Image (cartoon, rainbow, N blue to C red):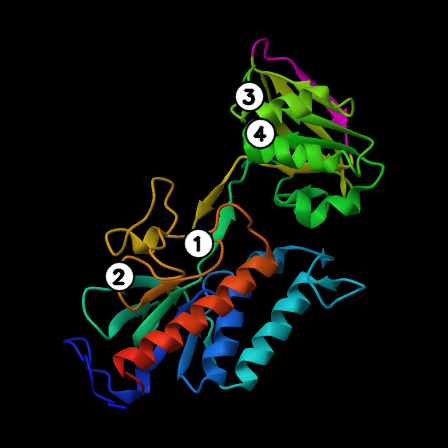
Amino acid sequence: MSKNANHGPHDSKGAKNLYDVIIIGSGPAGFTAGIYTSRAKLKTLIISGSLPGGQLMTTSEVENYPGFPNGIFGPELMMNMRQQAERFGTTVVDDEVLNVDFKNRPFLISTHSESYEGRAILLCTGASPRKLGIDGEQEFGGKGVSYCATCDGPFFKGEEIAVIGGGDTAIEEATFLTKFGKSVKIIHRREFLRASKILQEKAFENSKIQFIWNHVVTRIGGNKKIESIDIKDLTTGKIQNLSIGGLFVAIGHEPNTSILKDQLELDDKGYVVLKDSTRTSVEGVFAAGDVHDYRYRQAVTAAGFGCMAALDVEKWLSEKKIHA
């Protein structure tokens, strides 16, 4: 295989900072991809991003990842994945990507401290749940405040639960949480839902779900874990305190794609658009996980996409005969 095929004007750093594949992001998608590309003998770099390990680093116990019958702590799972990728030769750099240039190959990736070149790029930057930005939200994250019902719902058996939001995700999560909670209160800033009619009907018919309209949460309180929330009536301005054991925030996600604007095709919500399997609109640039998947958003699906993308990268590099 040619070692010098397709070199563009960026190829100035030489072999030291030139990789077959650069993976941007280090959640389940990124680390799984690194395991696969490294085992395929591709020179692989993972740039971890601002939160090395991704969203699972902020969760406590993960019960729904296959292979761990007793559950595993999110940070431990991610450290295991990192060690596995490194074992096969992946280089992991704890840094944040500031700029990407996909106009020429090899592609140029710039971080706070260094510039790297990649023959192929795999985007695994994920998505971040929208936050409320209120008192107590950060303090009680993982201690009663959650952004994923399917991840954390079973931890709230018998609790009074509140869900914030009025779209499909909020209503789906509230309905799911009725399997565990004593009751579920949906707190919404409007007096109507944006969720699809079929989801609304199911929620209205569910005796465990109560609706609190025209209200917002202004404060989260508790001791070692969440115990109550203050909610404000947007019509009257009156504030009341509700005792709850769990608060699920479902007001949407923001894909971490700010560095990708003007570089490749994004949809109207900012998610990466896939053209075929894991290929993006730029040849040689692939994507995996929550950066394009706004539907499932699970660790196991992100890992699955990471595997698919790694195999796609390997096939593409082989077809193009570009290999370090």
Q: Is residue 9 above or below residue 173?
A: below
Q: CA distance from mark 2 to mark 4?
A: 35 Å
Of callouts 3 and 1, which one flags the residue occurring earlier in the amino acid sequence? 3
Name the residue tied to disc 1: 291
Among all residues in the image, which is located at the extreme left?
9
Q: CA distance from mark 2 to mark 1?
A: 15 Å
Against 77, residue 223 (above or below) is above
- Considering only order in the chain, which callout, 1 or 2, is on the residue closer to the N terminus? 2
Q: Nearer the viewer, residue 210 or 16?
A: 210
The disc, 3 or 4, on the residue closer to the chain's N-terminal end is 4
Circle 4 Cα neighbour tier, 10 Å, few/some/many (<14 / 14–19 / ≥20): many
Tag in front: 1 or 4: 1
Q: Residue 232: x and y, percent?
A: 62, 19
> Which residue position holds label 2?
282
Q: Is residue 218 above or below residue 85?
A: above
The residue furthest right is: 158
Q: Secondary structure at mark 1?
A: loop
Residue most toward the top?
236
Provide the residue designation for mark 4. Answer: 165
- The span picked out in magenta is 235-244
Give the number of marks.
4
Q: Is residue 252 left or right of residue 183?
A: left
